[in-house]
Image: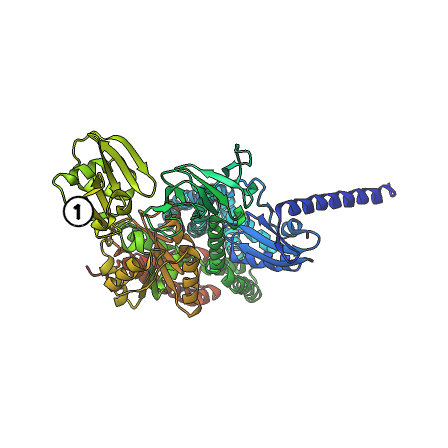
Amino acid sequence: MASGMPIARSLAEVDTARRRDQTGADLMIASASVGGGEREVELVAPEIHCAGCIARIERALQAVPNVTRARVNLSTKRVRVRWRGHPPPLIETLAGLGFSAHTADAPTPPAEDAERRRLVRALAVAGFAAGNIMLLSVSVWSGASESTRILFHWLSGLIALPAVVYSGAVFFVSAWRSVRRGQTNMDVPISIGVLTAFGLSLYETFTHGAHAYFDAAVMLLFFLLIGRTLDHVMRERAMTAVRGLQHMMARSALVIDDSGGERRIPVDQIEPGMIVLIAAGERAPLNASVLEGASDLDLSLVSGESRPVAARVGDTLWAGALNLTGPLKAVVRAPARESFLADMLRMMEAAEQGRSSYRRIADRAAQLYAPAVHVLALLTLIGWWALAGDPHRAITIAVAVLIITCPCALGLAVPMAHIAAARRLFDAGVLVKDGAALERLAEIDTAIFDKTGTLTLPEPQLVEADERVEGALAQASALARYSAHPNARALAAQIVPALLSFEQVREYPGEGVEAVLEGVRYRLGRPDWALANPGSADDEDAVVFSRAGALLARFRFEQRLRPGAEEAVAEFARLGVATEIVSGDHDEPVHALARALALRSYARLTPAQKVERLKALAATGHRTLMVGDGLNDAPALRTAHASMAAADATDIGRAAADFVFLRPSLLAAPETLITARVTAQRVRQNIALAVAYNILAVPLAVAGLVTPLIAAIAMSASSLLVVANTLRPVRSLVRG
């Protein structure tokens, strides 16, 4: 037997080494070279949930040999690690910290949905139990007979037991993980208070004591689970923009080989120099240049402009640009990891990573708060045991201290204010997607607007129709119905069409639409294409209608101001907020609009340049609100201190923003700012109330003047005080 022990140990060591080699091989496969002899891998760690997790993981991984950098993203729950040389034991290190991890290319279970369902179920169980126990407790408080009191205590215990076990597990598991590693967090005093109150209540029930505190234990769980659930939902929503952008990225493309054959291959296998075919209605899969064909492109992803742009041979195609009207052959200029969409995704993730410091500040405060509560309760227990010589009384007073110092009011101070603000804004037509953004919005001193779709309406409007020949407007409207071009749709919607039967209708990408009527050729489109003498249109940006090359009618389209735009800019000025425009549109329309609204303006900006503008403002101490709508605004929306988008914005734009306003008026932006400032004030008031409560209540509990039941009532009363302050009405200050 003695000789068998080294063999078993040796086999275990061999198995560990084999698994380590397999893990190292997996890391090499999943990693990519980043130059300078370094490789980078992305790991998924679903159990990351707070700022404390980030600090522990980054500190531990930085200490691993060969690791040069480790960064944790709280919302994506991913860890990016760079190293040199042999693959380090990253997954093993994370496992030692209590975090299961796998490479990002491995199948990921829907952990977020499961966690949300678990929190909601725990909240429902705690709420049901708290309501029923409170009904029983009211009878006891009102002077029930001894037999009734004993019965109700037993019934309360039977209701509380499953609630404490099931709902309390949310806090107990977190507290145990922290204590097991010699650390503490806010869940530790919560767990001690709940378990001690429940245990003491069981003792009182078994001994037919006068007091039981099941209501205190379960109510504490119910209130704290409200905040925990809201926090989780808001963090989960923060990832919708990144996921939406990932869905926009093409998975495959049709590649034309040297022999002229076509085959569809994954985008990540396409290399620069390959030729791809992009059909009408498809998005460009990679950055490329047009080799053959002509079409109209929807570049809202790139510049934010809804007006289609003509694409010709030699023009650049950015990944994500939507091909509208004709097939294109293009030569790939950059691999998938360097495409326009990939750059946007990296910018959004980097911005989200930088904002993680705003989340879960309470966990940092717990590093001081939790030990102080523990020490205070322990000293109270020792002191009363020594003074009174009665361990039961000493334990009862110590439990009262734990309950009365439980941070219920403090935990409600922020989420309740956010809930009330979210409801008020919803009634005003504004959706709040990130509660923490209310705090950030209250701090802004600069508002940045995109132009098209934000300060102006997204669809073009017909502002001038010059009819040179009677009946030409109705004829032009009839021909416009054959085109899907935004200008053609606006024309068809504004003018009643004639009842005509055009023949040989054909749309020329980037030019216009052509048809034959009674043997005569009609055209609706660009002047240099539709007219024999383009100079007769007097405006190269106009849309003209011609017959056999002769001008019949001329149309001019503009994007009109969004309702409330002028008033919103004036209201921001009244609130002390500077305003400016950043747009991907051409100089003249941007600067003209800026002059009309008295704004500073920046034109022809790419998404990266918009982000740089925001970073430059942040570097000088400014905190910005970004109001945008397009896919091209998504990185800026994620980078800004706070962000807002209209309901008619693109899916990615709405997902990236902290707020979405549903009504057409831009006055929703200053209205939201005022609400955010009032909410920040209420949060400070709530925190002050919670602190004042503890200053008054804790000495009474330590002095033995408060029973656990009174402590639970006082704790609940402080919570109700916070709720009442939060729900005080707010009068809108927006004028107009």
Instruction: Judge by depth and name the residue closer to the eye, 222 or 613.
Output: 613
Residue 686: image location, x then y, percent: 37, 62
For the residue labelled by badge 1, is the local secondary structure a helix, a strand or a loop?
strand
Outermost residue to the bottom: 620
Residue 139: image location, x then y, percent: 36, 46
Does residue 149 appear to the left or right of 648 in the view shown? right
Instruction: Judge by depth and name the residue closer to the eye, 642 or 345.
Output: 345
Residue 266: image location, x then y, percent: 54, 38
Q: Residue at x 31, y 43 (%)?
A: 511
> Which residue has dot 1 on it?
465
Does residue 508 appear to the left or right of 288 in the view shown? left
Instruction: Judge by depth and name the residue closer to the eye, 327 or 522.
Output: 522
Outermost residue to the left: 470
Outermost residue to the right: 3
Residue 517: image location, x then y, percent: 21, 31
Instruction: Judge by depth and name the residue closer to the eye, 583 or 413.
Output: 583
Residue 412 appears in the picture as rendered: no
Q: Quadrant of residue 390?
A: bottom right
Count up the numbered dots: 1
Q: Residues within 10 Å of mark 1 (few under 14, many from 20)?
A: some
